[in-house]
Image (cartoon, rainbow, N blue to C red):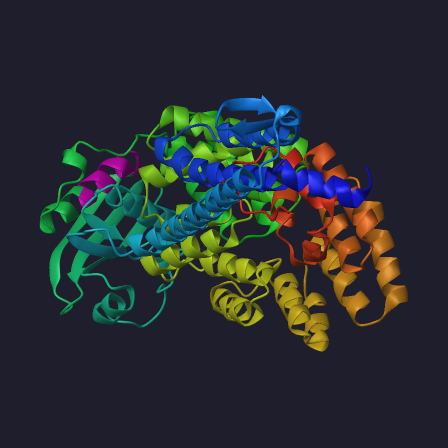
Amino acid sequence: MNLRNYFKELQRRHVVKAGIAYLVFTWLMTQVLSILIPVFEFPQSILKTAIIVMAVGFPIWLIFAWVYDFTPDGLKKTDDVTFDSDVHARKNVKLNRFIIAGLSVAIILLVVNQFRMKSEITEIKMAAFGTDFKSSIAVMAFADMSPQKDHEYFSDGISEELLNLLAKTPELKVISRTSSFSYKDKDVTATEIGEQLKVSHILEGSIRKAGNTVRITAQLIRTADGAHEWSHTYDRNLDSIFKIQDEIAARVCDELKLTLLGKDQKSQPVNTEAYTMYLQASHLTLQNTDKAYIAAEELIQKSLAIDSSYAKAWRLLASIYDTGTYNFSIWETHEGIPKGLHAAKKAIALDPSYGRAYANLASLQELSWQFNESAKSIEKALELDPNNAIILGIASLMTFGDLEKGLALQEKAIQLDPLVYGNYFNLGFTNYRLNRFEEAEEAFKKFETYYPNWQILHYMKGMVSLGKGDLETALTEIEQETHKFFSLYGRNFIYYALGRYEEADNVFKEFKEKFEKTDPANTADVYAFRGDYDKSFDMLYQAYKIKDPVLIEALSYPNFKPMYDDPRWTKLIKMIDLPENHGYFMK
């Protein structure tokens, strides 16, 4: 049988149209399952299984269509059926109608599914405006009135503890520490603060610590006119610090006619020496340098050795291991991440309602490739503390390649608390990965206003300038970067883009000698930038093999986009056990 006769036989037996009809049916069922599975909270594995089954069934269906035919008398072998042109034409019409109807329904369902996904992002954005607060407050940094002015860590820490206590009041909008403390040492009125932070009240005061005694003065001010609604001074021993915090929080709620979680929520008593070390460690982490994190880890370990029952100390330790390992490479991944996971789980065991601890656990689980557990933990964090700008910022970085969803979470965080400048860094980083360089540059400028000496900032600004094509500015920025890894990493791209190939080769050689084994995902990024996609894939697969914690973030780096159409890209994404709603490109 020659090809022309073979094709005519395929048409006579309706094999081609039967195949098209099967593909339309498969697409239709995929759209139906994509909508129903999230609604009824079925396992996402159902969709994978259905697609595999339908793919296996396709050749079987084609064979069936070749061998058998549907006749007015029932199912018969095609060879036993006498050809009738009228019957053949009627079957063609029926198959055409089925294909057109199926395509129409599938397209409608596709539009519905896309609309549903966009609606989820819209809901995230609108949720920022949907919380009904009866009142709002900003807890300012209490002034350090100690004789030597050397207890800022203590005054700041007590202010933050008061803020956290008040944040447990569902009817009260509490501005975050970052926003409130940004007014420290600035000559601004209560009314100006109220207008800028959109709050009805501020709580300010001072703390004087001398030996084992402490004097705390607190005053509640109405921002509309600057009137003092309440003021009180507490002279106590340091052992009573937690009772003072509870009294101030309760009094503020009374004045605002609110309920502090039924008025039964109290601060957890902690050994005062351990608590002081906790405050010092927390204060150190705000410096955001590797040396500060090393010192903070030593302090918090001493604090926990004295009193291991304080959930916040364990959460801080988890955060130190998370950031110290991932951002500053203080600890190797196999050392820092397990320690961080242990600390986060310990914090949750001590306080199961601690949203920040769940957020830190989620971040550490992602770094240890526990992706589905990570997704559940961040959901729990958002459930416990949905209006916490810090948790929203962490969640925005854990969207598994769905960068638009990440932007929506970052925008919500900024709307709730516009002066949490860490979220501007995240916003800049996400826009950079989306090749929206102007928006990224604007976000990094806002971040730099409050954190001009933050390590990694010059690297990011250099990469944004590189993306814009401003190579001279990119070079200037990377030359100012003090972080050893990111300074070397960034020079790889910028030297190569400038055409300084010998220097670029030398830098890349040094980078590979130091980091290729431990950081294959970043090495793959450099290879991709150079256009060596085969070696880039080799390193990506190596990153998968050793479970490089950077890989999940790196897969959204712009240098990999030219590799999306390569079958090796989709194969890699499928190999990783990601949540089903991930946003990575798959062909």
- Total numbered labels placed on residues in the image: 0
Q: Nearer the viewer, residue 329 or 4?
A: 4
Q: Nearer the viewer, residue 230 or 241?
A: 230
**Left or right of 296, for residue 481:** right
The quadrant where residue 391 appears = top left
Identify whether 330 is placed above or below 557.
Answer: above
**Residue 104 visible in the shown view:** yes
Residue 244 lies in the magenta-colored region:
yes
Q: Nearer the viewer, residue 221 or 441?
A: 441
Identify whether 180 is placed above or below 575.
Answer: below
Query: x and y percent of residue 176 in the render?
Result: 34, 53
Q: Quadrant of the N terminus?
A: top right
What residue is at 24 percent from the left and 53 percent from the top? Answer: 130
Query: x and y percent of residue 268 in the render?
Result: 30, 31
**Residue 144 visible in the shown view:** no
**Left or right of 483, for residue 356:** left
Magenta: main secondary structure: helix
What residue is at 62 percent from the left and 62 percent from the top? Answer: 460
**Left or right of 455, for residue 119:** left
Taking the view exactly as shown, the residue that stands out farthest to the right is 502
Query: x and y percent of residue 289 in the render?
Result: 59, 52
**Range shown magenta:** 238-249
Residue 530 lies in the magenta-colored region:
no
Query: x and y percent of residue 100 in the render?
Result: 47, 48
The quadrant where residue 191 appears = bottom left
